[in-house]
């Protein structure tokens, strides 16, 4: 089931990107986010369920939806002292108010996570003097064995973020 969903999301993103007209709107930007882990691992005394991070973002408008690629960087994930890098992709519908779904993975403590995470996202885009301010919340569904000694863990989380983007194409 997970593999099928992953293939479907990746296929939609690639098909949309390849079929996009040359005049499609493109935006880049950066922002900050707060991640709170809600899964079972939060009950482990060594794990800090609160994390703050930075985000780099790229968006491209394609027909009725927006394709977004992000990279998150959390300096100290779970109180481990190690950084977490999470590349991810989203398919979003709507303009001012929007929603969508995404998929991503993580690089932590020298290795890539073996299973992807899936996410549901909702937010609002505000136009401010030629810039877009995107405020959003997302819920991630994720199980992993990334922390040695904990076994298979539920890392489900909720994230609140804000990103400022500017246009780079027509």
Image (cartoon, rainbow, N blue to C red):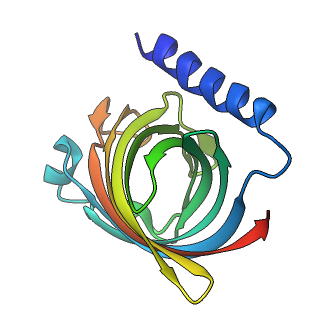
**Relative image position of residue 20 (x, y in whole percent):** 76, 38
99 sits left or right of 43 in the view? right
Quadrant where the C terminus lies? bottom right
Number of numbered discs present? 0
- Of all residues shown, which one is farthest toward the bottom? 129
**Residue 85 visible at all:** yes
46 sits left or right of 95 in the view? left
Hey, which quadrant is residue 55 in on the image?
Answer: bottom right
Hey, which quadrant is residue 130 in on the image?
Answer: bottom right
132 sits left or right of 148 in the view? right
Position of 6 relative to 26 (above/below): above
Q: Which residue occupies 60% across, 50% down?
A: 68
Q: Which residue occupies 41% across, 42% down?
A: 100
Position of 31 relative to 43 (above/below): below
Hey, which quadrant is residue 148 in on the image?
Answer: top left
**Relative image position of residue 111 (x, y in whole percent):** 62, 42
Considering depth in this image, is 115 or 44 the residue closer to the camera? 115
Position of 156 relative to 47 (above/below): above
**Relative image position of residue 91 (x, y in whole percent):** 52, 39
Position of 134 relative to 23 (above/below): below
- Of all residues shown, which one is farthest toward the right? 22
**Residue 79 visible at all:** no
2 sits left or right of 90 in the view? left
Q: Which residue occupies 37% across, 65% down?
A: 124
Quadrant where the N terminus lies? top left
Q: Which residue occupies 59% across, 81% down?
A: 131
Considering depth in this image, is 93 or 42 the residue closer to the camera? 93
**Relative image position of residue 147 (x, y in whole percent):** 40, 44
């Amino acid at each position: 089931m997970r593999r099928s969903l992953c293939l479907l999301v990746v296929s939609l993103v690639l098909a949309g990107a390849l079929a996009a007209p040359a005049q499609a709107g493109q935006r880049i930007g950066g922002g900050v986010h707060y991640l709170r882990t809600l899964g079972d691992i939060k009950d482990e005394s060594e794990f800090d369920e609160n994390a703050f991070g930075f985000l780099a973002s790229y968006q491209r408008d394609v027909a009725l939806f927006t394709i977004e690629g992000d990279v998150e960087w959390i300096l100290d994930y779970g109180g481990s002292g190690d950084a977490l890098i999470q590349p991810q992709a989203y398919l979003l519908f709507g303009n001012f108010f929007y929603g969508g779904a995404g998929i991503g993975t993580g690089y932590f403590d020298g290795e890539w996570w073996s299973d992807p995470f899936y996410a549901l996202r909702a937010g609002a885009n505000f136009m401010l003097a030629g810039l877009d301010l995107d405020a959003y919340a997302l819920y991630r569904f994720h199980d992993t064995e990334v922390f040695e000694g904990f076994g298979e863990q539920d890392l489900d989380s909720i994230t609140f973020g804000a990103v400022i983007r500017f246009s780079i194409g027509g």
